[in-house]
Amino acid sequence: MSSRLRGRPLVRTSYAQDMALLNTPAKRRSTIAIVIASFLVPFLVTDDLLLVLTLGMISAVGAIGLNLVTGYAGQVSLGHAFFIGLGAYTGAVLGGDPDAAVTGYGLPIYVWLPAAGIVAAVAGLLVGPIAVRLRGLYLAIVTLGLVFLGDHIFREARDLTGGPGVGRRGPDLVVFGIDMGESGVVLGLDLAREQRQFLMALVFLIVFAVLARNIARSGVGRAFSAIRDRDVAAAVIGVDLTRYKVMAFAMSSFFAGVTGALYYAVVGVFEPSAFGLLLSVQYLAMILIGGVATISGAIMGAIFISSLGRISGEIAHVLPFISESSGTDGLLSVFQLEAILYGVLIIVFLIFEPRGLFGIWTRIRNYWKGWPFSY
Amino acid sequence: MTDFFQALVNGFGQGSIYALLALGYVMIYKATRVISFAQPALMVVGGLFSYHFTSELGLNFWVGMVLGIVCGALVGMLVERIALRPMLGKPVFTLAIITIGVDIVLRIVSNRYIGVQSRIIEYPGGNERFSIGDVSISHQRLGLIAVTAVTVAALALFFQYSRTGLAMRATALDQETALAQGIRVGAVFALAWAIAGGLAAIAGTFVATGNAGIEQTSWIIALKALPAIIIGGLDSVQGAVVGGLAVGIVEALTATFQPDVAPWLGANFALVAPYALMFVVLLVRPYGLFGTREVERV
Amino acid sequence: MKLNRHLVRTSVVIAATALVLTGCRSSSSDEDSGAGPGISDEACPDAVNPDNGCISLGVISDLTKGPFAPLAVPITDAQKAFWKKVNEDGGVGGYDIDIASNIADAEYNPEIHNRKYQEMRKDILALGQTLGSSQTLAILEDMKDDDVLGLPASWNSAWEFEDQILESGANYCFEAMNGVDWAVANRGVTGKVIAVGYPGDYGGDAAAGVEAAAKANDLEFEKIETPTGQDNQAGAVAAILKAKPDLVVVTTGPAEMATIVGGTAAQGFTGTFVGSSPTWNPALLKSPAAPALEALFFQAGPWGPFGTDTPGHEAMRTALGDVTPNDGYTAGWTWSYPLLAALKKADEDGGITRESLVAAASELTEVDYEGILPPEAGATQGDPADVAYRSSVISKVDPAAPTGVSIEQDLTTGPTAEAYDFSKPCFSLQ
């Protein structure tokens, strides 16, 4: 029997209360506020910025998946790009235009989206046993080998992928009869294409974030954390290493698969070189900058890294000593500066806040918890 | 049969470049336990320094290469001091991402120097080739193999017989004890990065003497050394050399024979062949051919 | 350190707020005063003719990290010089043309290409350059919705069939046919021809041309795909040495081409190499493969190289000033002529808008290339089979020339290209 004491919100009288998803009133209120604010964003922000945020939110699901395997379970995986690619091509083949030059079956979203996740998860199941045998950097570079293997497969399977340099279209985005690729009036509101996609991505993110949070706070999540901290000790107390490591890979690959399918449905045209080392590194950077082993950290990191291109572009145009020309005069062209800023911002961030954005958030939160007695 | 030997010889030459780069990765890993993804940039930067000294300033090739090595080593030390020293003790993957950031920055700056042309160094031997029967090798590749052999031997002697080498080996074994014995661990880190920078500069110089020179996309060559270090074992110097040569030879053999022998693997399977070899080696020896087995204690 | 932390935090907050504010949706539509998007009656920033209005052109290219950055930077610079000269000559229809304000770097990535287009789509009249086939395809639907004309930075045969895209110069398909025909006539090629190229549309277009020419000249044909990377050419080299052809048509980048030519020649190969236009770089003269290149390599191109003596080339050299000669400049300069012609035609036809520009672009009967190409080369009105330009220039390696190549055979249409039934693209992009 649980009951809440009035005026004493942090006293918990049952296990369910303690383990609840939102177990303090502050969390409950702030979550509701953030969700409401997010639903209002499409009406306040320009379309091109909405596209950036939409893509950021979809990658957040992928980042959450990588966090499950690397942050929670401690298995470093550089192969995330491979699973994203598998999911993207599964979705594109199942959901794509049947009349195009590449294979497509024109199936609806409730078939291709789960199928993308499942195909990627099966691949993750196959990769999992490797993780049992290898550890640390050996595992990381072997998963990198997966990315190169995948690159080879995607480049050779021309009927499915269109081949390098040409690529193919992603699946058509039609959810509950509403076409996300069009602009117009829906449910009484005049929504542009970017606004519709933003709202769809927001719902997608909420569903998968809650799913991941529930995994993390369940027995499976605790087993993952035990494996990360000291897997020998975990084995001693009865955590089946093989089973949980394989499960971690499968789950993270499922998330990666659905991310890939939806991401490239929004982007439109994509080609095999998109799924290389750089994509894996980007996702790793997302969880490191966001904060390892936290779901909200992964989301914050994903949105940050996705906006980084835009941010460095804005900064580069403002700095005075950079010539506007793309040519050889000036110390650096503005585009090279943009590319350098991308690297510099990541470095600076990691040097000054190695616990990532979530660490910054924790510091802000603790400051205000103790206010006016913070120090 | 001549095809086979020619492929072997070509693979040995290309493998020497991978071996030099793999040595650099292993140096840094042994000293600091970090995989540095900045080697591609160091290779390009070192090669460009050599190019500048030989082709722009007109110095002799060997003098220019030595100066390029010194500059490459300095750049390596600078990177370590600025980007990595403040981050000692942080998780390993954070440091790896920082080296990726450094790689991006250095590469963009060198692309500025490279511009629209490839940067090619003229090797003093010209285009002569030595032949035994139908198998030939260019003077330039022979020079590369010779320089690699000398470098590896010099490094081995350095580690075995000099005090600094002993200090580096001690630090690689256990940093805290080494500190307690009075070894300046910070100087060891800087030296490891300097050696890696110098090795990458040698590799970059020989890439610049090739048919295509150094251009804006040449950095990808250095990524092929990653399977080499896994095959050899992350913390083994002889493993790096063996791994690099193995990758070069396997790549050359696959490129020559795979389209006839196993076309179902797809075109250009040679790109993936080093990783396939890596998988096979790891199935048998999970720590690479020469890597030390990690002992896990609770 | 404490002060540093506060400073860092405050500046981060200010930057974040500024970013958020720039992203706010404005309730008023941000149309410029003028005939439509991309064209305004106000003068351009840093205008040459302050009394003229302003037409904005966009450029989405690969300027830093992608594989074509070394070529794309001179292409973009030449285009900037071209439109600056047009402004100095008075502009078009009372408008100056501004290309420098809307240059974006897409890093050869279709996703970033799309994103950059979304950022600029309301501000531009047309795209002065869009680099990459899958990249352009990613925005083609939006370009059609917006009625935005685009100039591609490539010579794919598929663009002839796309009204939204305004290309110049013989495409890779015809270029390869002309190269093979020339080699058969001048280099005694009789047995086998191999097409070595990148997988995808660039290599595939040329390979289709080589196949057609091989059939017409009664030659054996083989196609080899090779990846990018100077260290990945061992397979191509081995295949060439095994097959021993008389002619190899190369459609890669300069580094790969030099590796293939140098590698095969070093082992005794003496066949002829004909490279597509983007396979040459002047710096290769210093490579160990240079003697082999001088003896065996010929470049097939859409027009004469940088140092050619025509009024157009001269105008380009004057406008660019003191730069390292590179045929990227020639390409960027020449590609811009049809857009100028289309702008002038749209102006004569009743005013420049996006729609009128797209209409004018598909109704051109001739374009003034200032001697670089004949005027009928730019004709777009009619069936692609009738108007597509089919002539190429064959150049040989010449250490004395500014870009290392000089013309061996001026613009000629070979018999295969002349007779080819061009009813669909040689290599389909969709």
Image (spheres, coloured by chain):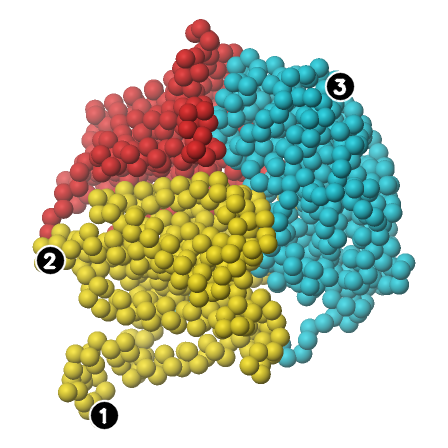
Chain colours: A yellow, B red, C cyan
Q: Position of residue B126 (x, y in %)?
A: 54, 15
Return the residue nearer the eye: C83 or A151. A151
B14 vs A193, left or right, is left
Q: Is residue B294 above or below residue C252?
A: below
Res. A238 mark: 2
Secondary structure under the numbered disc 1 in the rendered image: loop
Q: Position of residue A361 (x, y in %)?
A: 34, 70
In percent of the image, x 36 and y 57: which residue is there? A118
Which image quarter: residue A233?
Answer: bottom left
Res. C185 mark: 3
Can you name the residue that lies furthest to the top here? Answer: B133
The chain containing the residue under callout 1 comes to A
Circle nearer the viewer, 1 or 3: 3
Return the residue nearer the eye: C180 or C353. C180
In percent of the image, x 73 and y 61: which residue is there? C147
Looking at the image, how many numbered discs can be counted on the residues? 3
Residue type at the position of mark 2: Gly
Secondary structure under the numbered disc 3 in the rendered image: helix
Residue type at the position of mark 1: Gly
Can you name the residue that lies furthest to the bottom here? Answer: A6
Q: Which residue is mark 1?
A: A7
Whether residue B42 appears in this view of the structure is no
In percent of the image, x 40 and y 82: which residue is there? A33
Q: Position of residue A16 (x, y in %)?
A: 20, 79
